[in-house]
Image (cartoon, rainbow, N blue to C red):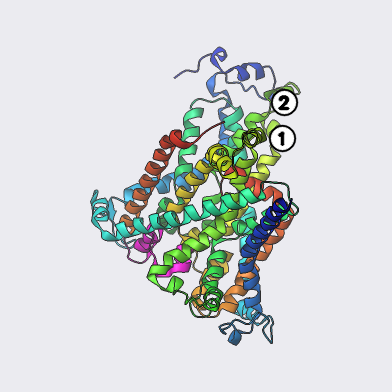
Amino acid sequence: MGRAKLGRVSRYLLVTLGAAVMLFPFAWAVITSLTPGDAVLAVPPDFTPDGAGLDAYRKLMETLPFWRILLNSVWIGVASTVLQLLTSAMAAYAFARLPFPGRGALFSVYLATLMMPLPVLVVPLFIEMRTLGLVDTYFALLAPTIASAFGVFLLRQAINQVPKEFDEAAVLDGAGHFRIFLYIVLPLIRPALATFAIFGFMASWNSYLWPLIIIKSPEFMTLPLGLATLHGQFTTEWDVVMAGSVISVVPILILYVFAQKHVIASVAQTGLK
Amino acid sequence: MTSPQTTTAPKTAVRAAPAKPVSPRRGGKWRYAGTVAVFLLPSAIPLMLYTIIPMLGSLWTSLHEWDLITDMHWVGLGNYAELLSDPQTLTAFGNTLYFIAGYLPLVYAGGLGLALLLNRAMRGRSLLRGIYFLPVITSWVVVALMWKWLLNPASGLVNWALGLVGISGPGWWTDPDWAMPSVILASAWKDLGFVMVILLAGLQAIPKEYQEAALVDGASAWQRFRRITLPLLSPSTFFVVVISLINGFQVFDQVRIMAGGNAQVVVTQIYDLTFRYGRAGMASALSWLLFAFVLIVTAVQIRAQRRWVTYG
């Protein structure tokens, strides 16, 4: 009947309106980044500015080594993800498969570190890095992300789901723990590894507080810190700031387009973003 | 202590015993010590260095007066006492609660609305879901800057649009009264898709039979929502509330970038105490107060969930 149709039409209208609200800020950032500097502050705003171009992007590259900052974000993100996957999977295997005295107690210690909020850690971590002479280095940026108690927890759950018979069969074939880990357990927990990889990469890519504290020179900055620094320098030059924002969204957007379903599932599953 | 015989070792170890590579010469509990060390040390050492030592260091620092340059002075619980009587602490906690009180209802209502709309077969649903989720994967710095620009008092798009309908927009983040609402608005916009995804998963877990039975009994849409959907969705709601509170108490990025000095929350206060006022001891004490606060709030919620969370 008419009423049912009306309901459907209004539902579509609502969800489309919602999608527009979600997309608009991104679109506006792109438009602003292409607007010539002197037209950015125009009121009323000009949606199709004359002389649109890449000036803001050129200025951005002159101000900060933005390609290098982008590259930093990429390689730090990849390195931190790979390291976390490796250290967490290994620890998870030990907790799930190797009997040793104090296993439960040690696992509780791992879980306890999970509860520590980052703000509690950043100040003493800064002091520690300063004492070691590591302020303003890649190492300091990466170090706190080498191990993840959360990853250990998540992957241990996954390994516990792998039937023990699989390892036992391998043991009978003469395989040691390293081979069982590499060739049996790791391939079987691939979905959990992917979930954790997405989480780890996003956490590194978006991290702001720790880089803000530990990094001073532009050549070691990652995107969020570079952008925030840019904003501090050009409080009114929004075309340049938006150009930087656009550049930092594009790589993650490309990844997202390809792995959308998996990204959403992993965020929903881990409850973290 | 001497190692007992293999008979006391866990079952799997006994069963694994006959195989050559996994049975080292030494028997007993410690037989896997070497392997365990190899598997655990790559995570145990960094956790020790970059989580546990800083954690203990933070406790130690919180008992001292320290400007990060000159020698530390022992003050015992002085920092805690000073914090508890300092009106700035109250302001920082108050603002943090203000943030949560504004953010949580907004993001929950919006996320629930979207989840209900998308909880049926419709064309383009996964595309829509992907679009709503886009801000979740965007970094906070980008989101804060985009919204700071949209909410620019003089040339921002929002105030221009408000002007079209005859409303003179506020000063947003430039105005101490409007700085927090600006942050809340941007935060709710960013996390809407996250809450939607969690609630959508919860909605899809509700068996259809309940709704159908209620429909047969002549229940109205509102009654079905109020009496079936909401109670059965409560575990997901509980999850959203717990996670939002834990994250909300630690809010930093968006407040620092959008509000600058116009809104101080606990973590921005910790940052300023350390790096602006040279009071690392006080900052550490404040971080422990925050931690204690989060622990208590989370524990209270877990206890209180029995009253309103329905499982199954």
Who's the residue at 70% across and 36% down the image? A182
Q: Secondary structure at mark 1?
A: helix
Near mark 2 (Cα within 10 A), the count class, few <14, some 14-19 or many ≥20, is: few
Q: Check contact, mark 2 vs mark 1: CB within 8 A.
A: yes
Please tell me how many numbered marks the rendered image carries: 2
Front-lying residue, A179 or B227: B227
Q: Which residues are magenta?
A: B254-279
Foreground: B23 or A253? A253
In percent of width and height, residue A245 lies at 60, 69
Looking at the rendered structure, whether the residues under marks 2 and 1 are on a common chain is answered as yes
* Residue located 47% across and 61% down the image: B184
* Amino acid tagged 2: Phe
Q: Earlier in the sequence, mark 2 or mark 1?
A: 2
Q: Is residue B255 magenta?
A: yes
Q: Position of residue B90 (x, y in %)?
A: 30, 57
- Compared to B161, does A267 lie above or below? above
Q: Amino acid at mark 1?
A: Leu
Give neighbour class at mark 1: few <14, some 14-19, many 20+ (Cα, 10 Å). Answer: some
Asked whether the viewer can see residue B75, the reply is: no
Q: Report the front residue among B282 and B33.
A: B282
Residue B232 visible in rendering: yes
Mark 2 chain: A
Residue B298 appears at what percent x and percent y? 42, 42
Residue under label 2: A166
Please tell me whether residue B226 is drawn above or below residue A168 in the rendered image. Answer: below
Residue A270 relative to residue B77: left or right: right
| Quarter location, residue B93 | bottom left
* Residue shown at 45% from the left, 71% from the top: B172
In this figure, which residue is indicated by the disc labeled 1?
A: A188
**Which quadrant is the C terminus of chain B positioned in?**
top right
